[in-house]
Structures are given as structure tokens and as C-alpha cells.
Image (spheres, grey):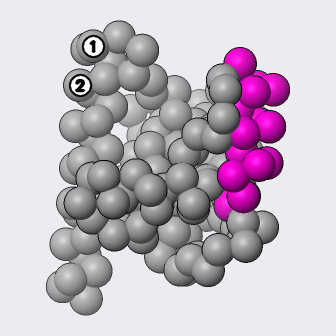
Amino acid sequence: MSIEIANESGVEVDTDAILAVARHALDEMGVNPLAELSILLVDIDYMAELNHRWMGGDGPTDVLAFPMDEGSVDHGPGEAGAGEPALLGDIVLAPEVAAKQAVAAGHSAADELHLLTVHGALHLLGYDHAEPEEEREMFALQNRLLQSWRAGRAGG
């Protein structure tokens, strides 16, 4: 799996861990091993600009996901596909926003970035949380992926 990461946020983060959690989530979801993903970490001002331009939101948000081509996503062996490598898209993270949310949630900024990375990956795979049932499904899956990733790190 090809995952590119660029930290343009001005905040020091463990990009190796972000890459690892993204790879784990996509592997667990059965995504084509030749798939490509881009992760970009940005500052608050740029995230606010992206949020306004693409989502109509005011101010910065924590994570944005920009799917490349939803029709090309290989969701795994249960679905027939052309076998072509998927260009999944881009996940954009704002570490400063994540750090503030982490304080409110009672965990580390790194944990918040890992959660947001998985959240963004699930959005790229077509998951959403606009409706209560969708939210329950997506957040349960997000929690399962994070728990299995953390368990793997603790045991290895």
C-alpha cells in the first residue's frame, strides 16, 4: 500500500504512527494492497480555508477526507472489482485542532490524530455519519480498528 504523508502544519507529530494506523485500517478493511493514499497535515488557517471552500464550514475542522474516485475503491474480496489499484484520495488533518480536542476527550494529541486518521480513511471508503444508524456503524468500526491497532502495537 502506498501512503504518502506530508507535514506542513508546523507541529511536530509522529508521522510514522499516523502511517501505521492508516495502513492498519486499510488492511483490516480489505483494501487493495496496491491502493494509494495521501495524508496531509496542515495548520489551522489552511484547514479553515479548506473547510470553508469544500464543506461550507466556518473555521478549522479536525479532519477532511477527499475521495479520488469512489467507484475505484476495492472494498475487499467480498465484492467483485476490476482488480485495479485504487486511488483512495486524501486525508487532511489539523494537529492543532486535534490537540485541543484531545484535551477535551482526556487522551493524548497523538491518540486523537490516530482516531482522526482512521475516521478519514473510513470516509474515503464510503462510510458516513450523517444518519444515526450510519454513525453507530462508522464509529463502532472506527473503535474496533483503533483497538486492534493499539493491541498490535502493545504486543509487538
Circle 2/circle 1 CB separation < 8 Å: yes
Secondary element under disc 1, as helix, strand or loop, is helix
Percent coordinates x, y for residue 17 in the rendering: 47, 76
Secondary element under disc 2, as helix, strand or loop, is helix
Is residue 125 visible to the viewer in this orientation of the structure?
Answer: no
Task: Establish if 149 lies above or below 35.
Answer: below
Marks 2 and 1, how far apart at CA: 6 Å
Is residue 94 visible to the viewer in this orientation of the structure?
Answer: yes
Given residues 31 and 104, the one toward you in this image is 104
Q: Quadrant of residue 62?
A: top right
Range shown magenta? 40-56
Task: Establish if 51 lies above or below 148.
Answer: above
Left or right for 102, reference 144? right
Specify the amino acid type for callout 1: Pro
Q: Quadrant of residue 54?
A: top right
Q: Which residue is mark 2?
A: 136
Task: Establish if 155 lies above or below 48.
Answer: below
Percent coordinates x, y for residue 70 in the rendering: 66, 27
Left or right for 128, reference 89? left
Q: Which residue is mark 1?
A: 132
Residue 41 colored in magenta in the image:
yes
Name the residue located 41 percent from the left edge and 67 percent from the top edge: 109
Q: Residues within 10 Å of mark 1 (few under 14, many from 20)?
A: few
